[in-house]
Image (cartoon, rainbow, N blue to C red):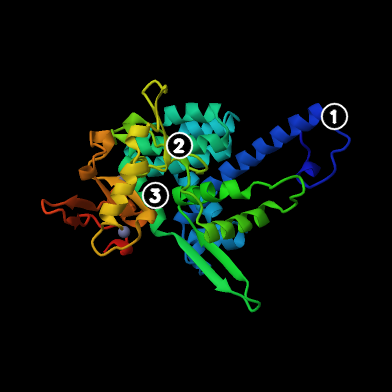
């Protein structure tokens, strides 16, 4: 057992390995119990006027400042405290040390995201058998299955949040900071990854230096189109209800069906399609890709992005299937048009439509639902 002095840092060099293991597990459980109790108090505090009395703008802000927490941690505590009454079995599982507080936070956030479709028993079972990191990932698939539209909208919103700031220092160095959505970040990683590898035993550059060198090399030489691997079920690609999200190589979180649809539309992607029994049924079949002479003919015909008013050159464009091959569309030139990355995204994830009229002109139809300032 732990004694009062165990709360303060002190050397444990006198312990046996068995004792070390046992104590760490016990300590983490006690911390989780304290987190649970803190969460309940934080939620009750948020419902009171105590934080207002202190002049704070919100309970989260009060916790952030007075309890020395990050905004995310404070918000999580209040959310867990407010939700635990609706998920008693999960809260009890933390008390019984079957799952950790980290699992519980993910359960709460998932309940918040899927609303009425939340199934506590199912998720609790997954939590018991998964590490918190894996469980977080599983919950994203679950959220996609429960509400693919909301999931796709959230990912679309993340694309609208993309930022890249380049500032020049006094000595001419360029400082880079920014933010990419999960799929965009994965594309960048895939593009620089071959250039990030060490060039031999003598290469003693650290990871950050190699990444910076790789980015400059990419900018100078253009590089070849990134090959990204997408693993998706056929149900996901067809956008069927209840389908899980898809996995994108090098991407921290699962991606929505809409994004898979766009990536699978383009030829620079290695697709792995899974049947309902998780057996591989298709690995990027060549006949669906637009490459070689067919792509050259397309480049000559369209010359640039065919979105009205856009002139991004053909080499920067994807071959977009006007009727997706997953829905029976062919690889014939009539069914394909060049679209730049931005416009390809707007068609698949941004809810725009692009059609070719009988005179061969491209017409665009804006989304009926607006969800971001850039799509006005
Ligand atoms: Zn497309
Ligand atoms: Zn374009």
Around disc 3, counting alpha carbons within 10 Å, would you say few (fewer than 14), some (14 to 19), or many (20 or more)?
many
Q: Residue at x 76, y 36 (%)?
A: 2
Q: Distance between the residues labelled 1 and 3?
A: 48 Å
Quadrant of the displayed image that contains ligand 2: bottom left
SS label for mark 1: loop
Quadrant assignment, res 63: bottom right
Disc nearest the viewer among 2 and 3? 3
Residue 64 visible to the viewer: yes
Whether ligand 1 has any atom under 8 Å from the Cβ at mark 3 is answered as: no
247 to 70, vertically: above or below: above
Residue 167 place in picture, x, y as percent = 55, 72
Residue that carries the numbered disc 1 in the rendered image = 16
Residue that carries the numbered disc 2 in the rendered image = 139
SS label for mark 3: helix
Q: In which quarter of the image is the C terminus?
A: bottom left
Quadrant assignment, res 171: bottom right
Residue 275 place in picture, x, y as percent = 37, 24
333 to 99, vertically: above or below: below
165 to 59, vertically: above or below: below
Q: Quadrant of the N terminus?
A: top right
Residue that carries the numbered disc 3 in the rendered image = 155
């Amino acid at each position: 057992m732990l004694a009062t002095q165990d709360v303060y840092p002190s050397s444990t060099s006198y312990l046996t390995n068995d004792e070390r293991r046992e104590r760490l597990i016990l300590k983490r459980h006690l911390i989780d119990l304290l987190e649970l109790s803190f969460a309940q108090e934080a939620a009750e505090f948020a419902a009171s006027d105590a934080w207002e009395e202190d002049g704070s703008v919100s309970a989260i802000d009060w916790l952030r400042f007075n309890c020395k927490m990050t905004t995310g941690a404070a918000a999580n505590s209040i959310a867990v405290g407010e939700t635990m009454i609706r998920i008693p079995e999960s809260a009890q599982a933390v008390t019984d040390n079957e799952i950790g507080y980290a699992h519980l936070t993910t359960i709460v956030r998932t309940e918040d995201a899927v609303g009425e479709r939340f199934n506590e028993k199912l998720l609790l079972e997954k939590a018991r058998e998964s590490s918190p990191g894996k469980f977080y990932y599983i919950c994203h698939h679950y959220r996609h299955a429960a509400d693919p539209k909301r999931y796709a909208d959230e990912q679309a919103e993340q694309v609208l949040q993309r930022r890249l700031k380049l500032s020049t220092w006094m000595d001419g160095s360029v400082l880079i900071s920014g933010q990419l959505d999960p799929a965009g970040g994965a594309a960048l990683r895939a593009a620089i990854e071959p250039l990030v590898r060490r060039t031999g035993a003598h290469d003693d550059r650290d990871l950050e230096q190699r990444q910076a060198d790789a980015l400059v090399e990419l900018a100078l030489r253009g590089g070849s189109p990134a090959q990204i691997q997408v693993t998706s079920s056929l149900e996901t690609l067809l956008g069927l209800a209840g389908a899980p999200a898809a996995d994108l190589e090098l991407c921290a979180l699962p991606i929505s069906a809409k994004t898979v649809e766009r990536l699978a539309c383009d030829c620079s992607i290695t697709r792995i399609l899974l049947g309902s029994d998780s057996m591989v049924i298709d690995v990027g079949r060549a006949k669906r890709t637009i490459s070689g002479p067919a792509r050259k003919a397309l480049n000559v015909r369209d010359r640039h992005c065919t979105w009205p008013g856009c002139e991004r050159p053909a080499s920067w464009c994807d071959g977009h299937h006007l009727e997706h091959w997953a829905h029976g569309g062919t690889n014939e030139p009539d069914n394909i048009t060049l679209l730049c990355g931005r416009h390809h995204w707007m068609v698949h994830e941004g809810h725009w439509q692009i059609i070719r009229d009988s005179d061969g002109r491209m017409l665009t139809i804006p989304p009926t639902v607006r969800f971001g300032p850039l799509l006005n």
